[in-house]
Image: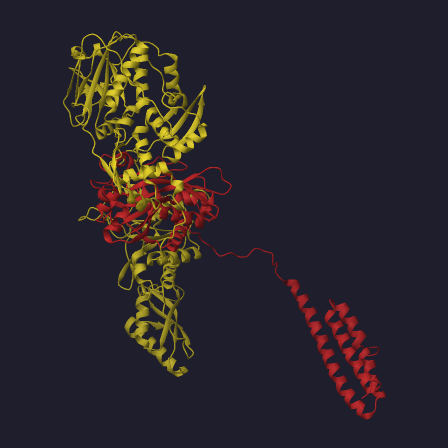
Chain colours: A red, B yellow
Amino acid sequence: MSSNDPLEIALRELESLEQFSIAALVAASSPEALEAARIEYLGQKQGKLKAAQERLRTLDPAGKRVYGQRFNGVKQSLEAALSAARLRLERRAVAAGAIDVTLPGAIPRLGHRHPLTQTADELIDLFGRFGFSVARGPEVEDIHHNFDALNIPPSHPARDPLDNFFLSEGTMLRSQTSTVQIRVMEAQRPPVRVIAIGRVYRPDTVDATHSFMFHQIEGLMVDRGVTMAGLKTVLRLFARSYLGHDVKIRFRPSFFPFTEPSVEVDMLWHGGDRWVEMGGAGMVDPNVFRAVGYDPEEVTGFAFGLGIERLCMRRHGIDDIRLLYQNDIRFLEQF
Amino acid sequence: MIVSWNWLTDYIRLDMPAEILAERLALAGLNHESTSEVEGDLAIDLEVTSNRSDCLGHIGVAREIGVLFDKPMWVPAARPTSSGPGVESRTAIAIEAGDLCPRFTARVVSSVRVGESPWWLRKRLETIGVRPISNIVDVTNYVMFECGQPLHAYDLDRLAEHRLVVRRGRAGETLTAINNRVYELDPEMLVIADATRPVGLAGVMGGLETEIGFDTTNVLIEAAQFDAMSVRRTSRALGLSSPSSFRFERPLDPEITDWASRRCAELILEVAGGTLHPSVIDVGGPPADRGPITLRLAQIERVLGIRIEPGEVQDILTALGLEWLGRTENSVTVRPPSWRPDLEREIDLIEEVARIHGYHHIPEDRAVPVTSAPRELRERVESEVRGLLTGLGLNEAVTFSLVDEAQSLPVGPGSGPPPLRIEHSSRKREVALRQSLIPSLLAVRRHNEAHGNLDAELFEIAHVYLPRPDQSLPDEPTRLALVCGRDFRQIKGVIESLRARLHVSSPLRAQPVEVALFAPGRAARLLLGDIHLGYMGEVDPDQLATLELRGACSAAEIEFAVLMQQAQLVPLYRPLPSFPAVVRDLSLVVARSLSWADLRAAVIEATGPTLAAVEYLDTFQGGNLAEDEQSVHFSMTFRHPERTLTGDEVDQVVKAVVDACASRLGAKLRV
């Protein structure tokens, strides 16, 4: 067939009519525009489809058959496009009864984890990655575990009744989670890698930074070859993971009866100009090993203790420790 | 310990900036608190740990500076000239309580002129925050802040028979101290007495009647050693502490006693004139020499993780004043100086070497061996519980373990044993260890109500402390407590959700119980299977009034250990049913006294294996029902594992249920 074939020309024009008319129907954005498009293409008198139908008469019988078939197909697809466009515009009209999607959502009542347990969980998680598992011990302790086994002799000022909560003869509220170190080492042979976490009690006068009850996390690692360099490494890894990559740590000599050498651990934040004391640490004192039946010639160990309140307050910018125990909903809901 | 910059220069040349000095001291163990300028001098406040009493005087701090900056230092010889009759002709000393006073020295200076101290002495004391009093008293204070040894000066002529006795206090004795307060003494306290009465609390404070006055002419200088615990006990018992007691409570240099006494005499002669009687009365005398300590060089690396050259070890230890007794290839042997009673063992020397070498030399990038530490059951269950309860709208609280006695009772029927109590002077209320968490949470709810946060819904996971008659330590079970404004069924639903979340297979059972906290008829004991889980209920309105709570609330407290034991954190897959279920509802009219548990049991028994679930829907009372009747509406789900049930089959089972309930429980079908 040549390009001058009347049938082919007619079919090409029909196809182009289909494309343009459907595009016009789809593009109509209002009932008025749709009606204009309908009249233009599907109008009974002047419509372009009507004109295309009249083209039929100009064709030979074989052409009429082919063209007629194609014409009916185009007509159907145009009618379908018209009704689809009407439906679309109708639905838009229905949407006048729509809701304001910018209204706030209806929020189900949601509770919050206490910031202290969030902090503790995070610490457990972090030290867990360093291989420390969680150990627990009683809060009401005997003198042996709280003092004697920790190399705190009867003459030591830490045993003063004014600085401790004693119960009846021989028991007390533990003043440090180091008691758990002793219980763990009494119960298992080296190697040991644990953190103890929990409540401790000291009769401090309550103010913005002191509470008579607070929480500690204490780490203990005992094995052959455990050194102060290992301690510094673990604490640096901890500081970086918990507080940020640009946190530095330093050791300052200190004194704790159950570790020697003993150090205070200071941390320095990026941009900060002041080292902040974060806790105490040191190498487990040989007397502590002897008290639990470990041989200090065989193993060495390190221990460290951090105040959970201090970490929590530092992390969340809380400036008064008492807020942590008031449990005001307006406070709890911030975490 | 506040030190004066100018004062330190008496013993050592300071040519470094004050900030550098403070930082080096801090990094060697004397933490820097603050530095303030005081009229041409600097007052540097250093925190001295309890093992380093040698740094409770300027000489000790100067010695430390000398080691850190590698500088020589000088200590005054303190060799005052004496003349006239021997001191024994003027006074006598007797120690009756040798266990509490190992050494007591006395010197006497006669014909002094008591007056104001010279300017330099006043100035130095003022710089470190000590108020000047008179030249004699100021000298005793000066020497204490110089070398750490406390001293006391007596007006010799006011001592009965001019002599002193070191003895225990006697019941009924009193002493008026120089602070003008009267203290009652007891046999636990060590006192300094004259022939007739106590004239001082040993190591703590002197007596008013024998203190130096402006009319004093003859002075007895006391320099002694007292038992640290005894001083501390006396100081605490009387609520009286002083710079002297602060020092005596720590191990002091046992050999400094006589030097301090000489130095004191020397300065008294300088600022108040007079004549020092020859020699000294020294009861007890200096201690025996201390034994040597051997440091195995390999131990340094074993503990610190770094090697320190033997030459440096020697330099550090000798600079610190340890006497060098020799070395072998593997070890060094030294004798610690008297001013470092804290150095007794090899590990003490390792710490000294580390601290002076500098902790900044210890690396922080060592490989730490890998080991696995999976989260323990407890952590996992706690995490699930916290996640669920916060998701259900409850906030987590952390409350104190110590409560008022009235809030310390356990929850449950009966009253239980009395709580454990702490004994401490700082606390009058809140001295009991709690046996239930609920009162604390109710108090939190009240705090919130008072601050406009109505209906605080709370939970806490914490220990309670239950006395055990046969053991010294109490039982400390962990409890989970809930307090919220929801009603009984809602809070029970929370516990059922917990059970579901933890995949506990045992059913939750509830039995009616009488609990004082809860309203009658609205409390239950909970069990998981046959195991006691805890108590729950709606708080009694009378209790609400007592607690000053406005809104109604309910509470529950359950044993965390039971949740842990029964939690199934790794649930096993059950195949999904292949055939559809048929659901039928029933409303049965039964007696009001019949519990759902009993009705449910009857339904289950009457149905057989095709019953997949029975679900309570609601209860209707009143209307055309009799007073003692209720209509219970529930649904039953039936399913056969191998085929689809027919309607007829299900109808038959339902009929069997109705018949069984009719005959066993007197139930009627509600129409």
Residue B33 falls in image quadrant: top left
| Residue B388 screen position, x and y as percent | 41, 58
* Vertical side of B645 occupied by B228: above or below: above
Residue A94 falls in image quadrant: bottom right
Is B247 on the left or on the right of A29, as rendered?
left
* Vertical side of B235 occupied by A75: above or below: below
Is residue B72 visible to the viewer in this orientation of the structure? yes
Is residue B549 visible to the viewer in this orientation of the structure? no
Is B642 on the left or on the right of B293, as rendered?
right
Frontmost residue, B572 versus A152 = A152
Frontmost residue, B518 versus A298 = A298
| Residue B327 screen position, x and y as percent | 26, 38
* Vertical side of B262 occupied by B423: above or below: below
Q: Residue at x 16, y 10 (%)?
A: B89
Frontmost residue, B518 versus A38 = A38
Frontmost residue, B247 versus B28 = B28
| Residue A120 screen position, x and y as percent | 39, 50
Report the number of discs: 0
